[in-house]
Amino acid sequence: MIWSHCRLNKTITDNYDLKAWFYKRENAEDIIKQVDNPDIIGFSNFVWNSQLNHKLAKEIKEKYPKCKVVFGGLGNPNKNRLNNFFEEHDYIDIVVNGEGELTFENILLELLEDKPNYKNVEGISTKDFVTMDRQRIKDLDSMPSPYLDGLFDKILLDNPNDTFEAALESVRGCPYQCTFCEIGDKYFQKIEKQSNEKVFAELDWISKNKILFFYNADSNYGLFPQHLDQVKYMTKLKRETGYPDMMMVDWAKSRADKVIELARILTDNKLLKGITIALQTLNPDVLKAVKRKNVDNNKLKEFVDLYKDKNLKSYIELILGLPEETLQSFKDGIYEILDMEFTDYVDIHPMTALPNTPFFDPEYIEKYGIRLVETAPAFFHHENADDLLSESEMMVVGSDSMPLDDYVEASLFKWYISFAEYLGVTSFMAMLLYRIYDIKRSDFYDKLYEYTKNNKDTFLGREYVETKEALYLILDKKQCWGRQVKDKTGEIYWDFQEATNIELINNEDSFYKEIKDFVLEEYSDVDEHMLDDIISFQRSKVSTPEKQYPHKEKFNFNLNDVLKGAKVKNGGYEYTFEHKNYDNDIHAWSKEVIWWGRKNNGYEVKIVDL
Ligand code: SF4
């Protein structure tokens, strides 16, 4: 976008050539070889590329001392947090603060002067001075689009074998101030929008170029009327051309009423798999500490029921590591969600401290006793461990309310509940035990967790130990986030619960036997005959790589109806189970069911009438 804008200026195109443009992660040596005595080089930084960018910038400056090195992006400290940044990184000449299009244009023009004076450029920091803030761009329509001016056409032409995703931001800014988010800064509070005309033209490009996956990067999708226009336009494109095929958005946080119509249209047109409920926490003290308001005055149950009524898949997002959260309040939040009979996915993210948020502010850190450690970026599903270990991310691993040991314990609980409930491994039996014996799901999971910790010789107990060991290595930056399951899926790093789910293959018999023992030991009311039926039903309701579908199975009780709220009856029932067959292809199953399908209950085997 920066070059799209700068090349509209004739002085710039008369004096500069954009020689190369590095948008794919390559190793530093290969990039350096392609850089030949530049006058200026710009870097865009975030957690996934900062260390590589610093390495490149340092080497380029050493090789070409006259080259102006400019850093932009949200990965650099803003003007109030510079401290010794320029002393420690003396190869950087200029840091651009905020939007970069106009600022970089001004830098290029200044560089053409006999005696450049960068004090004339608004919105920058250097080792000697910081200039006044540049105002946010008001008229976004006046800015060119790399989709529409041919720049991205060239990328597609030059890389015919690559698959591309497209991102588009139709609204810049966010009215909220969440302390864990860079966009919560005052600078981004004003909302600026692009016209539908421009957005539709970009969507046309995406469709015409057969881009399958599209990400709308607006901070509050559904908050503004034009989002409905865009949804209608996109679905029309999909119906006519098949592209884009799938999209992702960040939904408006507190307006179920506004987003539901959009989600309905997108889901009906198979453009969307689910709708996010971004809660981050259910603890009011935490919400206050992070300056966040939750959905509709905490009418979460209403929200969840509304989505269920409309047959829309949803998933809840939580963050582990926020100030004022305790181990117990974190678990209680999850128990509350369980007991409102929410059965879709809950995505629990470890908390990353971004450099320009209050999480790097000494006063905020002191106020809440926030504890930070440097780890590799918290990414999963990759195979490039060494590369990721060379980058870093500051993670919040506790606070006064959650000491490190409690943070580790909360992380293990996150692993456990995500595996057992949110990947479906015991979710159907937990619901059936609730319906038949009135055992609250929170109680079942609370007791099963204690059983796991106290029985290290069980499948779950062994996985608990392994996950804990991996976590300590990660917090010491000796390993990437997640775990590999080498004998089954090679080098891929899975999120912990996914790794345990893959380990479960070939261990199912002993695992469900242990679960049976646990239930009989803990709940004396449960009839063994009924429990056997429930466990068989549970096993049939989750996909495994070796099962063949469709398959029929007989049960004594009407468990499928009980799941939907009917009274239990004993009479002999046969169900037909249907799911995709994987013919023991663990790789394909893990990717499609566990990874891609995780937010959409992809593990669930349907019961069908044949
Ligand atoms: S987390 Fe979302 S709602 Fe909060 S400030 Fe960031 S973009 Fe806005």
Image (cartoon, rainbow, N blue to C red):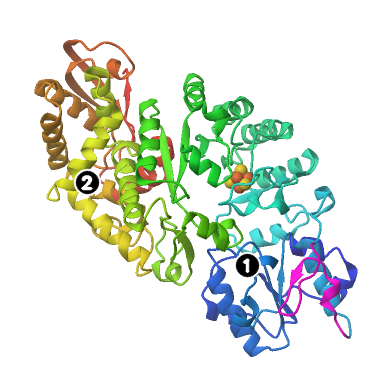
Mark found first going from the N terminus, 1 or 2: 1
Amino acid type at mark 2: Ile
Q: Nearer the viewer, residue 380 or 591?
A: 380
Position of 480 relative to 110 (above/below):
above
Q: Nearer the viewer, residue 400 or 275?
A: 400
What kind of element bears circle 2?
loop
Split into quadrants, the picture shows ligand 1 in the one at top right
Q: Are marks 1 and 2 in contact (CB under 8 Å)?
A: no
Magenta span includes 127: yes
Question: In the image, which is nearer the foreground, mark 1 or mark 2?
Answer: 1
Position of 41 relative to 484 (above/below):
below
Magenta span includes 148: no
Q: Which residue is mark 1?
A: 76
Q: Which residue is mark 2?
A: 505
Judged left or right of residue 375, residue 550 is left
Amino acid type at mark 1: Asn
Position of 48 relative to 599 (above/below):
below
Position of 467 relative to 341 (above/below):
below
User: In which image quadrant can residue 559 be found?
Assistant: top left
Specify the quadrant that holds the C terminus.
top left
Dominant SS in magenta: loop
Q: CA distance from mark 1 to mark 2?
A: 44 Å
Q: The magenta stretch spans which residues?
A: 115-133
What kind of element bears circle 1?
loop
Determine the residue positioned at 38% across, 29% down.
343
| Residue 9 makes an appearance in the image | yes
Q: Nearer the viewer, residue 558 or 337?
A: 337
User: In which image quadrant can residue 67 be found?
Assistant: bottom right
- Within 10 Å of disc 2 (Cα), the crowding (few <14, some 14-19, many 20+) is some
**What percent of the width, then of the height, locates residue 10?**
89, 68
